[in-house]
Image (cartoon, rainbow, N blue to C red):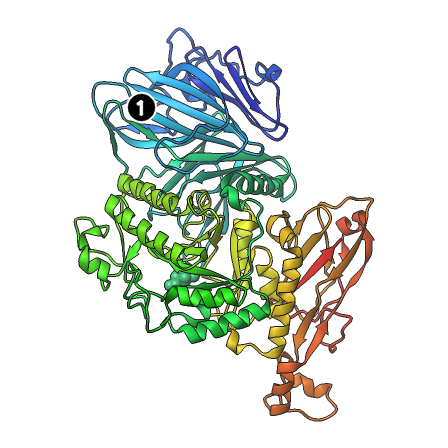
């Protein structure tokens, strides 16, 4: 609902509210953002300013309370007395917008220039502000669990203006906060960092041309002392895949100013008379149930209003991807062999990754070309796809359409299509980017990718992009608009194609890409223990339905860590499950385990992908109200472990639940020479007998089941005792380092 009374605007529903007021000077004040309040609260929530303040500059010399610098604002100017961070900077020009009029609109207001945006049931408040030569339209859209904001600037004057900085949103929040950001790099995405918000500005920014693995655009502000389940937490994000910026700074009055939008670094957009410029959409939400409460609101918002409608709450297939198993070294025979094995293990979609086109036998050649490599695939993509379909699986394909290798037919024909600057080209992963601001480049990509999709019954696309850009400021923004144009033209007519975007893993995990495809490949780091950090970090802002999460080989390619197959499965279950390893090297016991994993996952996949997610003291849980699945994960086990407890959140206290562990097994081989202490005959750990036994025999790992009330499970029930050096016992959890247990509570 959006109401207006006496210059006060209230956007509110049962979850969230935003109260704005046009003050006597036509400036837009923010009286409140957070939990529900009513119109009757407006007066009480307004700061009473009657006194001046030392060196401050006043809007009206006769009114000591007219200092913009002290106001709690929802928009502000430059050079007009508010010396906090300005949301809009024009080259050599002050800005001083005053309220003109407003409209309340049923639904969203569509973007004018090609940026993606949240959709679905909503109401929008448009506030128009003006100064002599410029008009500013501020859009506030109320969804059920979040509010979005964006702006459009229109040049209504006679001369050109240059926009150097234009934020999507500005707000002043009273109180002391800590800011949590998610930072990292390649194979190290989403590491959570928290710093206090004090008087110096804290900035979260990307300038790599992408939303980036360095600094995800999403961030949190939490009141000091907030925990996972209590306290006020605000969440912010941006529906944008390019360079982004957020600045947070506390004022002397104790207002924390929060701005977010496109990065102003090197930005300079000239607006001729009559021209407009619109910002991406900023997203904000709030919870007084701690970080967990905020995450659940953000998840709901992404699932309902960001991902393409066709894929909302639609179950995702269990996939097999050949990349980590084969890299560039495959042919049709090898792929069909893998597909058959994958099918028998329970996979439903076979994805052919990099290396199927041009002269692409390593990453130095072929990008930009779309001719199928007939040496590897003699019957073409269609021939391969037909055979995979005949096996009862769907077929998916990898593309990296935004890039070009110098050693490619495309580059030889159109060297001018590459994105360049005044200097020597800089390669990244031996490749250049194509200049997506050029219409002919976009047409080339759209025609080729669409043609291939239609020619070979492809139902899944992995859209990769493997280098940082060299484009700056406005050019970098235009590139992203070009990318959105290409994605829209390819995928809008083919909504049934499941698009998983990827950029060296999680280099573009953002709400912009999620508007076109419902999944993102979280990271090239598939080590499950690392994934606890990566998927754990993502879980603050993105739902598990958006995570591409695969079981890969152990020892792991990036860490050499030897994690049990059970844990590799248990971690990947909390996302869209896939397998990405050479299936020809699986032992019979591993095949049995993978079959059990895919069966288990399929039974509960709706809960894993769309259930309510909660972070617990020792892992993650998901729930649909009837079934809760709780994963408990360990990193390093001590020699003398204490008791471990299972504490489940979100249960009904009175209700009685049945709980049981998903059956898990241990390989005999992992006990090495210790086996000789329990075997009746002396056995060589590296000898034939034990090596053979290791392939075929497993030992059960502490199966635990029972009934307990919601209260007991909330308080915590002791899990089976963990291994403590006194021998194997199936009544105990023989938890190794990197072990895990998965409970089903029904
Ligand atoms: C990137 C992706 C990987 C894989 C390779 C192929 O690194 O993140 O998953 O697709 O490219 O070259």
Q: Is residue 614 left or right of residue 443?
A: right
Q: Residue furthest bottom?
A: 681
Q: Quadrant of ligand 1?
A: bottom left
* Residue drawn at 55 percent across, 43 percent down: 303
Q: Residue furthest top?
A: 62
- The image shows residue 486, relative to residue 677, as above or below, that is above
Q: Is residue 306 visible?
A: yes
- The image shows residue 76, relative to residue 363, as above or below, that is above
Tell me where residue 28 sits by quadrant.
top left
Q: Residue 279, how many percent across, how many down? A: 37, 33
* Element class at badge 1: strand
**In the rendered view of the protein, which quadrant contains the N terminus?**
top right
Query: Dot 1 corresponds to which residue?
Result: 154
Q: Is residue 294 left or right of residue 328?
A: right
Q: Nearer the viewer, residue 619 or 591?
A: 591
Q: Nearer the viewer, residue 216 or 277?
A: 277
Q: How many residues crowd mark 1 within 10 Å: few (<14), some (14–19), many (20+)?
A: many
Q: Residue 257, how many percent across, how many down? A: 45, 30
């Amino acid at each position: 609902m959006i109401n207006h009374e006496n210059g006060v605007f209230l956007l509110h529903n049962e979850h969230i509210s935003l109260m704005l007021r046009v003050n006597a000077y036509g400036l837009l004040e923010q009286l409140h953002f957070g939990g529900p309040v009513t119109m009757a609260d407006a007066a009480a929530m307004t700061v009473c300013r009657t006194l001046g303040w030392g060196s401050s500059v006043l809007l009206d010399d006769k009114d000591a309370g007219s200092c913009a610098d002290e106001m709690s604002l929802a928009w502000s100017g430059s050079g007009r007395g508010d010396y906090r961070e300005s949301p809009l900077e024009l080259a050599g020009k002050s800005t001083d917008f005053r309220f003109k009029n407003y409209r309340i609109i049923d639904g969203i207001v569509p973007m004018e220039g090609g940026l993606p945006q949240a959709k679905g049931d909503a109401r929008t408040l448009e506030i128009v502000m003006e100064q002599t030569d410029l008009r500013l339209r501020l859009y506030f859209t109320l969804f059920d669990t979040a509010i979005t904001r964006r702006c459009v600037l229109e040049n209504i004057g006679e001369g050109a203006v240059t926009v150097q900085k234009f934020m999507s949103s500005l707000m002043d929040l009273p109180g002391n906060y800590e800011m949590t950001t998610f930072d990292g790099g390649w194979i190290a995405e989403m590491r959570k960092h928290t710093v206090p918000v004090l008087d110096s500005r804290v900035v979260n920014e990307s300038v790599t041309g992408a939303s980036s693995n360095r600094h995800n655009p999403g961030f949190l502000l939490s009141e000091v002392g907030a925990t996972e389940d209590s306290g006020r937490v605000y969440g912010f994000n941006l529906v944008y895949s390019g360079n982004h910026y957020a600045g947070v700074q506390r004022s002397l009055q104790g207002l924390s100013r929060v701005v977010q939008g496109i990065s102003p670094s090197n930005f300079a957009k000239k607006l001729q008379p009559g021209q407009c410029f619109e910002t991406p959409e900023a997203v904000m939400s709030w919870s007084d149930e701690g970080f967990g409460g905020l995450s659940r609101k953000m998840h709901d918002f992404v699932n309902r209003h960001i991902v393409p409608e066709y894929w909302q709450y639609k179950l995702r297939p269990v996939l097999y991807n050949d990349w980590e198993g084969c890299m560039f070294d495959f042919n049709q025979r090898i792929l069909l062999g893998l597909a058959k094995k994958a099918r028998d293990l329970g996979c439903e979609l076979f994805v052919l990754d990099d290396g199927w086109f041009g002269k692409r036998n390593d990453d130095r050649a072929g990008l930009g070309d779309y001719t199928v490599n007939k040496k590897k695939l003699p019957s073409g993509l269609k021939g391969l796809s037909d055979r995979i379909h005949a096996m009862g699986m769907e077929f998916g394909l990898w593309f990296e359409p935004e890039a070009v290798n110098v050693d490619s037919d495309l580059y030889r024909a159109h060297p001018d299509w590459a994105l360049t600057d005044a200097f020597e080209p800089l390669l990244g992963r031996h490749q250049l980017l194509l200049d997506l601001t050029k219409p002919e480049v976009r047409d080339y990509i759209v025609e080729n990718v669409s043609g291939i999709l239609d020619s070979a019954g492809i139902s899944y696309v992995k859209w990769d992009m493997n280098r940082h850009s060299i484009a700056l400021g406005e050019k970098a923004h235009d590139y992203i608009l070009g990318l959105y144009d290409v994605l829209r033209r390819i995928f809008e007519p083919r909504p049934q194609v499941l698009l998983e975007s990827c950029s060296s893993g999680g280099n573009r995990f953002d709400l912009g890409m999620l508007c076109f495809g419902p999944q993102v490949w979280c990271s090239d780091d598939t080590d499950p223990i690392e994934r606890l950090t990566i998927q754990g970090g993502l879980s603050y802002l993105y739902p598990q339905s958006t995570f591409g999460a695969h079981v890969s080989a152990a020892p792991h390619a990036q860490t050499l860590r030897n994690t049990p197959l059970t844990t590799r499965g248990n971690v990947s279950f909390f996302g869209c499950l896939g397998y990405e390893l050479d299936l020809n090297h699986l032992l019979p016991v591993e095949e049995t385990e993978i079959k059990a994993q895919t069966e288990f996952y399929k039974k509960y996949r709706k809960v894993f992908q769309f259930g309510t997610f909660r972070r617990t003291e020792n892992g993650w849980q998901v729930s649909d109200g009837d079934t809760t699945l709780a994963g408990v994960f360990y990193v390093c086990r001590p020699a003398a472990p204490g008791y471990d407890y299972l504490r489940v959140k979100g249960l009904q206290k009175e209700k009685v639940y049945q709980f049981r562990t998903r059956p898990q097994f241990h390989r005999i081989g992992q006990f090495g020479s210790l086996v000789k202490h329990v075997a009746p005959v002396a056995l060589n750990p590296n000898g034939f007998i034990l090596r053979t036994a290791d392939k075929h025999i497993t030992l059960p790992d502490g199966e635990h089941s029972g009934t307990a009330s919601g209260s007991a499970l909330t308080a915590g029930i002791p899990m089976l005792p963990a291994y403590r050096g006194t021998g194997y016992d199936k009544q105990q959890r023989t938890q190794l380092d990197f072990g895990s247990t998965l409970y089903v509570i029904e």
